[in-house]
Amino acid sequence: MPDHKEILYTKRDSTMSHYDEQREEHKQQTKPAAPQANKYDRTIIGKYGSGKCVVDVYRVLNAFPTGSPEIDHGVKKLLAAGKRGAKDELQDLKEAIQSIEARISYLNESGA
């Protein structure tokens, strides 16, 4: 009589032992979950069709530094106006304008 470790069966045209099957099931159950998308994630296609990648508004702001938290905040509001679930488009646009006006006010006060 064969040992239980040696019992083989056919699964999808391949022969696997009982332990191989359990190992495979365990791998499937313990796969790391895909990263959780946040409300700012967007999939973009690279320049010249170089492939897809996921970016968020913060990576865009890193690529195009403004040097101003007020402008950064306004850009964030503009890039996802009404799409973040918290506020509607009109409210986000008003808040973007307020952020940009705050920067203009700062520049006027500082004499820049």
Image: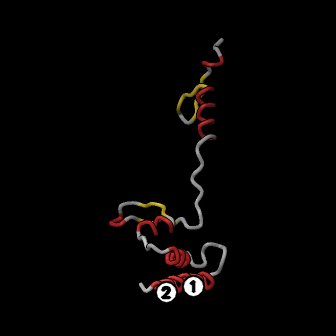
Give the CA distance from mark 2 to mark 1: 16 Å
> x%, y% of residue 24?
59, 34
- Residue nearest the observer in this picture, 75 or 44: 75
- 52 displayed left or right of 10: left
Helix, strand or loop status at disc 2 = helix
Q: Which mark is residue 98?
A: 1
Residue type at mark 2 is Glu
Which quadrant would the N terminus be assigned to in this image? top right
Q: Please identify the residue farthest to the top as the structure is shown.
A: 1
Q: Residue at x 44, y 72 (%)?
A: 67
The reply to whether dot 2 and dot 1 touch (C-beta < 8 Å) is no
Q: Where is mark 2, residue-wise? A: 109
Identify the mark nearer the N-term, 2 or 1. Answer: 1
> x%, y% of residue 90?
61, 85
Quarter of the image holding residue 8? top right
> x%, y% of residue 25?
62, 36
Quarter of the image holding residue 97? bottom right
> x%, y% of residue 87?
65, 78
Q: Is residue 63 shown above or below 111?
A: above
Q: Please identify the residue farthest to the front as the structure is shown.
A: 110
Which quadrant would the C terminus be assigned to in this image? bottom left
